[in-house]
Amino acid sequence: MTGRLVTSVMPVAAVFLPLAGVVAGLVLGRISGRARAWGLGAICAATAALTIALIPGVLDGSVYEIYLLRLTPVIWIHLRVDAMGALFAATAALLWLLALVYSVGYMADGHRLGRYYAFFMLCLSWTLGVAYAGNLLTFLIFYELFSILTYPLVVHEETPEAMAAGTKYIIYILMGGSLVLLGVVFTFFLAGDQTLTAGGILNATMDRTSLLVIFWCFIVGFGVKAALVPLHGWVPDAHPAAPAPFSAVLSGVMVAAGSFGIMRVVFQVFGTELLAELGVMPVLAGIAAFTVVFAAVLAVGQDNIKRRLAYSTISQMGYVALGVGLLGAEATIGALVHITNHAFMKGTLFLCAGLLIKRAGIHNVSEMAGAAKRMPVTMAAFALATLGMIGTPPLSGFISKWYLGLGILDADQPLYLAVLLGGALLAAIYLLPIVYAAYFKKPPTIAAEDTGEGAEAPASMLVPTVIASALTLVLGLAATVPGFPYSLARMATEAFFR
Amino acid sequence: MAAWPHWLPLVVFAPLLGAVLTPIVSLRSRHVAPWWALAVMSVTSVAALFLVLRVASEGPFSYLPGGWQPPYGIELRFDEFSAVISVICLIGWLAVLYSLRYIEWLREVPKERIPYYYALLLLNLGGMIGFVVTGDLFNLFVFLEILSLSAYALVAFSGEHIAEMAAFKYLLMGAISSLLVLFSVGIIFGITGSLNMADVATRIGQLDSAAPAALALAMLAIGFMVKAALFPVHIWLPDAHAIAPSPISAVLSGLVVKVGIIGLIRVYQIYYTSGVLDLHTLNQVLVWLGAISIVMGAFFAIFQDDIKLMLAYSTISNVGYIVMGLGLSTNFSVIGGSVHVFNHALIKATLFLAAGALIYRTGYRTLTDLRGIGRSMPLTCIAISIGAISIVGIPPTAGFLCKWYIALGAFEADQPFFGFALIFGALFIFIYYIRMVNAFYFQAPVHPEILEVTEAPLSMLAPTLFLASLCLIMGILGRIPLAFIEPAAARLLAPLGG
């Protein structure tokens, strides 16, 4: 990417501030839960502010970078903020802040809170590292760290289901991580250490078989995390087992990190021209399209709300991969924007699902009848995010699907338009009945007597949920304001397709 | 200071002499023995430090006792591979410190025998140091016997019946391997009339018939493979390492098996230089055996419940890495393998010392019995976790760079399959460490009293934590050992015309 290179410590600060949060959390936690909540909230807010503060400069054409440490005689740990990374980092940090605030209320009577918050902050740090990684080795380091150090959060509840989900998670993720490592090693062997920039590291003069091997190592490796069918097995188990605020970031950011990795590989390791020549992208698009439909169909059959949402995540990440697979400018914008939009929509849904569990004891879709009466605000947020997920204008989900649709038409692949619309229709089928039951079905009388009328959560949990859902609206209405996802995605994409 | 020529003999003879004097100085009180051993190891460590500094600045150097020139007099030779004495001294020093409380605690050991424990430990360390710095073949054998015999005795030291059995098994296999080494040293002397390694290398090249040289090579290789516990001659290792007292397990697993590796390197130095044989076949055998060791070691480890037995099997896997690196015989792989000699020593010592601390405090040694220990001994368990992450090779810990380099070497040697085997072997290894982490942190205790224990005393905790921090530091500052060993690897492979 052409741009002014500016050496800056801001990316380092953003990555390492949450690490300070780990220590602060452990120390303040000894004083009181309140002190920890404020301390971590402040640190998380500062981190989010840092990631957002980098955006105007990036839009101006600056590329912030810094060389941290030489890991081997030839490879540096290198942080570099480009448009794509800035967008992903800001999304992650904001969603993390919301989930953290929500955690304070949600986890208040939980166990082992010191561990929970420590790993929660650790994972934010590594996620930002993934977003800002300037070369493949740096990317790999942060990616592996955050994949593995997520494990304590997945099994946090320590129930047999959580343990089983954790085992499944770690095995899937490590398989994927190993393939990514293999891809990185092979790339390094062929091309040496190079900065990730548009145009790619590899080129057509290299052995075709090697290039194909590298490509599929990366796609399958990241595909595990991005939950491409048939590599999605861990997602439906891990989400219901984890605490709700963590499910929100798991779905919104962590799964998306896989998609983000795929984008880095497609646009910055291979480059669009080389991939067009290799002719592998239609296969990726096909897998992605299948993921969209297949996961959505499975989602319809789930009764557990969080499980249904998990399948929805798989389906939505399929959209992102589809956008990348089409290898067109508009579709790529759609894919990039959808990562952010999906993060807040799915974040809202999971936070609401957590409130339903916590305040009304509702785990399943079949128990939803009349929930809106008892929790009006929660269900309003849920309904808004649902509409966004389906792609109703003017909500954010519509924006991403619009660009994906444009991209599909650009690529002259009308069949995928049917996938796009079919996915949206299926989203309506699996999400709307929840909203419908909450608003229009009569509650079973016994349940209502049990929990009383007003089950609405306290403000500390409600506010982040409402903010996340409001973002769904704001990101839709103000989609083209500079600094919002569209502008960054456009900027990144222009560099990829020259 | 570093230029003083007599550090080299001092580093060998200080521990040997110290060992002999240990029973004498502790005649009056057995409590003198550990402090004496600590003092001896301190002197040795200082000498080792100066030697490493010297080799880093001026390259390999020799010491000729009495000024007799090499083919006639004996020679001590210090090259970059010999720098492994720094790890030997470090771990030896820490093991002595750790033994201070640990050996007193062993009920089966008669108290008056304790000075002999330290004498044997010093003898073992001195033997290893002599082995890696000697320049001629006969002394190589002598030091091999010193360290082997003391190792058998140390395994049996607790005096339990099971320890005697393990030591006997070890002795049987060890004696065969020593015999093979002795025979081949004899053959080499017979055909060349020389014992000095550098001299032998040139003389073997001038022989008419390569057959005896080939026989000697095969016997040396098998002999050292037994010492290194490569599959399928590993069968002595698990029992011996699991049953020995924990500080001894750290020394045996971290250091003594590496003697086999260093021996192999010395053999390679002779045969590569002489150019008398094409070592391709031997290399292929080593690579395959390495790959099988990685997988089989990990496979057996998965089924162990005894924590030390698990660690012992993991050593077999790691020796597999190193041998694979040597066998691939490319620049990258040899560097990776050699650095792993250092790093694995640190990591495995961390793990064994931490495991020893758990056993010391709780009296239990199986994962099932140790469930929940993470709550009562947090620091020790953090050390184990860091060790586990390092040994699996998660970046940026000490284990990662070796994996990276050996995998790169596999590509360089045009045998990518082994890169694949290496990376997925590591995955296998992770599975059993996950079991360990689960047991310590996430599973309910089987024995409630396990929550009551406290951290081990400082003399055991401090060495463990120090080594654990080195596992991280050696990863983050990995370029230093990599750059250090590079010239030695280049020199080793130079005759191949690479």
Image: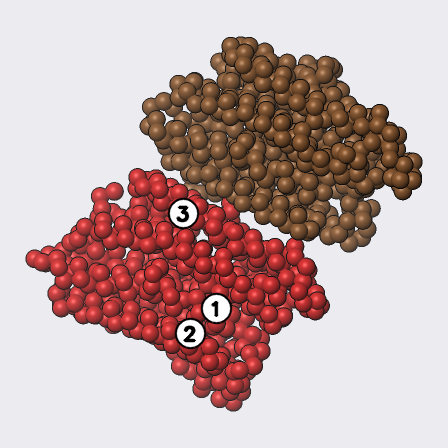
Chain colours: A brown, B red
Q: Say which amino acid is labelled 1.
A: Ala
Residue B103, quarter of the rendered image: bottom right
Residue at 78% across / 26% down in the picture? A435
Cα–Cα span, label 1 and label 2: 9 Å
Can residue A56 be seen from the camera position used here?
A: no
Other-residue count near label 2 (Cα within 10 Å), few / some / many at <14 / 14–19 / ≥20? many
User: Which callout, 1 or 2, points at the residue further toward the start of the chain?
Assistant: 2
Q: In the drawing, does residue B327 fall left or right of residue B68?
A: right
Q: Say which amino acid is labelled 2.
A: Ala
Residue B331, quarter of the rendered image: top left
Residue at 43% across / 49% down in the picture? B425
CB under 8 Å between discs 2 and 3: no
SS at circle 2: helix
The spot of residue B374 in percent (x, y) is: 65, 59
Q: Nearer the viewer, residue A106 or A133?
A: A106
CB under 8 Å between discs 1 and 2: yes
The spot of residue B464 in percent (x, y) is: 56, 63
- Name the residue carrying label 1: B242
Q: In the picture shown, does residue B356 fall above or below A363?
A: below
Work out whether disc 1 and disc 2 sit on a shared chain. yes
- Name the residue carrying label 2: B166
User: Which callout, 1 or 3, points at the residue further toward the start of the chain?
Assistant: 1
Other-residue count near label 1 (Cα within 10 Å), few / some / many at <14 / 14–19 / ≥20? many
Q: Nearer the viewer, residue A142 or A220?
A: A220
Q: Nearer the viewer, residue A209 or B144?
A: A209
Q: In the picture shown, does residue A130 fall above or below B403?
A: above
Chain bearing mark 1: B
- Name the residue carrying label 3: B422
